[in-house]
Amino acid sequence: MSQSKANATPLLQVRNLKKHFPIKGGLFGRTVGHVKAVDGIDLSVHDGETLGLVGESGCGKSTAGRTMIRLYEPTAGEITFNDPQSGPMRLERAGLADLRRVWTNMQMIFQDPFSSLDPRMSVGRIIGEPLTVHGIATGSELRDRVGELLRRVGLRPEHQSRYPHAFSGGQRQRIGIARALALNPKLVICDEPVSALDVSVQAQVLNLLEDLQDEFNLTFLFIAHDLSVVEHISDRVAVMYVGYVVEVAPTDELFRNPLMPYTEALISAIPPPNPRRRGRPMKLAGEVPSPSNPPTGCYFHPRCAYAADLCKVERPPLREVTPGHFAACHFAEKLSLRGIDGPMPAIDGSTAVPASPQA
């Protein structure tokens, strides 16, 4: 991403976004607590870039993506989408009519290619539904548009009459991609779109997404738990831990110069391309805290080897430590953390070893 683009107004900007789910208990089902799935994140996604959002399972990254697009109602915070036609719009307080207009420019690709497609609908109806709902195309125009979308994602136009059960996982995900592109959106939120696919199919889908991004000038928020996938496709990377963004930086900078201890631990789990240089992943003490009862101060401090008394009582804000590199750590300037040496493992069908941030 160029410096001029980085300084431009973001296409999507999130400030202090929170999504808390109530915990019901007792005879009358009263609210006895909350699961803080997303607990005050700040993010910006710029036009034409791919921002990777990475973290362990359960850290809140998928919930964050769904809340940004208003599939979930936010508990607090601001979501601003700079619509190319109508200008900035605050999504957290937008009504249904405004959201319908914004959704033509914001779409989502879901994680599971099996449950995200209605098995009772033909492929033609699945892909054409957004066009029908928004009154954009009908009849032969609709069929032609659906056929063109199928060609763009590597399928055949005559597949319109088939049903999802006739396709493999990778083909189903291509159908989901075609559906997301039906309205010519500017921003696509990709919620772990390749995590359920074989590694060889992952490479094909990732390459397809990159080709479509160039062809349609798309912007991606790419949610994943696989660091090698994120490194392959992202311009910048944001790391989440227990509902909170703890580091944001350009991809190469983050992998080679992490400023937050949790990021260092994730990177240490990546298998190096040279087996003779294989080291031991960092072992983190304890378990990931529950988002219903997070620790005081920095959420990572019970597992952090560098924690001090300050970390136990004050949660560090996400701040710009070096130009373009943000970290939520009180001692980011003082720590000397280990990044990755050499190139990341390639993502292809023959030699890829998927990396997962299981600390």
Image: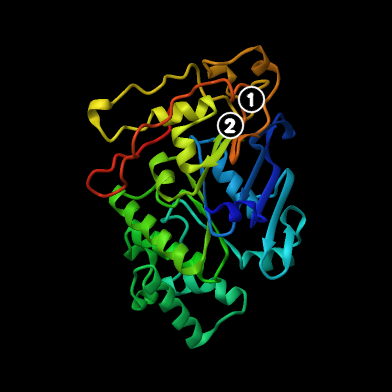
The residue under the point 28% across, 26% down is: 278
Q: State whether residue 114 appears in this view.
A: yes
Q: Looking at the image, which is closer to me, 99 or 269?
A: 269
Indicate the quadrant where residue 80 lies.
Answer: bottom right
How many other residues sit within 10 Å of disc 2, few (<14), some (14-19) or many (≥20)? many
- From this view, report whether residue 300 is shown above or below residue 147: above
Would you name the residue on which mark 1 appears?
294
User: Which SS class for mark 2?
Assistant: loop
The residue under the point 58% across, 59% down is: 47
In the rendered structure, which amino acid carries the disc numbered 1?
Pro
Q: Position of residue 143 (x, y in %)?
A: 45, 82
Q: Looking at the image, which is closer to me, 25 or 308?
A: 308
User: Which SS class for mark 1?
Assistant: loop
In the rendered structure, which amino acid carries the disc numbered 2?
Val
Among the two numbered marks 2 and 1 on one chain, the one whose residue lies closer to the N terminus: 2
Q: Looking at the image, which is closer to me, 199 or 75?
A: 199
Q: Are marks 2 and 1 in contact (CB under 8 Å)?
A: yes
Give the left or right position of residue 70, taking residue 201 as reference. Answer: right
- The image's mark for residue 326 is none
Q: CA distance from mark 2 to mark 1?
A: 8 Å
The residue under the point 68% across, 20% down is: 296
Would you name the residue on which mark 2 appears?
242
Q: Position of residue 312 (x, y in %)?
A: 66, 16
